[in-house]
Image: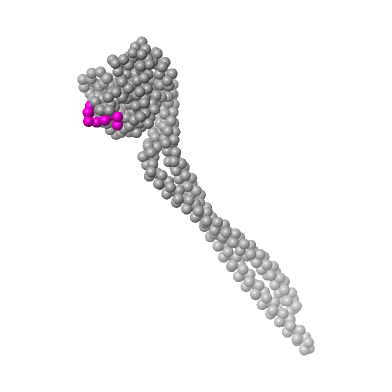
Amino acid sequence: MKKNIIIILSVIAVIFSIVLGINYYNYSKYNEELNYEKDKLEEIKNKVNEINNNFDSSTSNYEKLKNDNQEKMEEYEKWLKRNNEVKELLS
Amino acid sequence: MAKKKQRSKRITFLIYLLSIIIVCIIVFNIILSLKAENIANEINIIHNEYAELEKELENKNNDLTEIDEQTKIIINIDDNIAEIKKEYFSNIKTLEDKILASESDKKIAYLTFDDGPYYLSYKYLEVLDKYDVLATFFTIGNNKEVCYDNKSANCYLLYNEEAKRGHTMANHTFSHGIFRGLYSSPTNFIEQVKKQEELIRNQTGVTTNIVRFPGGSATAGKYKNAIIELLRANGYGWVDWTAATGDGGSLASADQAWNNFVNSIDSNIEVILMHDYNHYTLEILPKEIEYLKENGYSLFPLFYESNMVNK
Ligand SMILES: [Zn+2]
């Protein structure tokens, strides 16, 4: 009788051990994935920072150019508007 | 007996041991599962954060492209203005072609002002500004350093006032000397055209190749064809008019100018002759613009490629 219990318990222990093995395998896979995702996130964060810096410098460069050429820009925009009005007449 | 008891004890111990091992395995399993779940959650959060950053990156990239394009436009602003003007005139030409082929029911009017600039031209510019309308100025050059109608003002300054607003600068010869030998020979005429072209270029930076004969092309008399030939050979186009306020002659009143104007508007493309020294024309100019707009006309400045400019 006790022998049977031992066999059953052994089987259970083996099964649970296998489950534990599988769980551990999954866990380490998740861990790997987490590290990979963390690296990816870090990478995109750097990219965002870089583009933000580029954007800021481009914007200030643009604003400066725009101020320096304000009259010409206004003239350009006027012609754009006029051209759009003619285009409307054509459509 | 004692041996049997000892064996039973060992088996019991084994059972306990196995049970403990199983419990431990279960606990480990639970801990691992929980940890795995935590990691999965963390990955999920990172995924979301990543997606957001990716979106931000894309938006910023688009903004950056837009800014870079705008910057390029400013860097090449002169070329871009020239380019858009070219497109503008090319579109008007297409519209003219459609109107002339009866493929469009739209109408076009070209307001043209001859013999200026005068000091009164400032008032004309004010009206055109107010209505946001571009016109064409067929200018002359003789004695314009001093305004004829305001001796204390320099009328050379007006060339640039007209040009910088986008009005078309056109050539009405330097001397306008109908009775001073302008039409005495084709070369004489061309000389006066070139002299005026030079003056306009010096005052505005604009080179114009649109000419109007002082008094109209018929005034050239026997040399008309020879002059036209010479104009063509020199790359000039010329234009008369299809409507007028009659302000080149003796106008008695603004009403008379108005009647002349209204009675002469009868086609889908009109070139309207006026003179920017005339007070009556100035008086009715707002009404003229409103009348033309109400009757479906779009008002444009003339350009060399126009069907109305003879080549
Ligand atoms: Zn004239």
Q: Where is residue B132 in the image (x, y as percent from the top left)?
A: 32, 33
- Quarter of the N terminus of chain B within the rendering: bottom right
Q: Can you see residue A19?
A: no
Indicate left or right for B297 with A13 as reference.
left
> Toward which corner of the image does residue B175 lie, by quadrant?
top left
> Toward which corner of the image does residue B270 lie, by quadrant?
top left
Asked if B247 appears above or below B35 in the picture, the reply is: above
Which residues, given as a range, are shown in magenta? Answer: B149-158
Identity of the residue drawn at 21% across and 22% down: B253
Asked if B130 appears above or below A34 in the picture, the reply is: above
Q: Can you see residue B248?
A: yes
> Toward which corner of the image does residue B16 lie, by quadrant?
bottom right
Q: Position of residue B158 (x, y in %)?
A: 30, 30
Which is the main secondary structure of the residues drawn in magenta? loop
B167 or B6, nearer to the observer: B167
- Callout count: 0
How is the model colour-coded? one colour
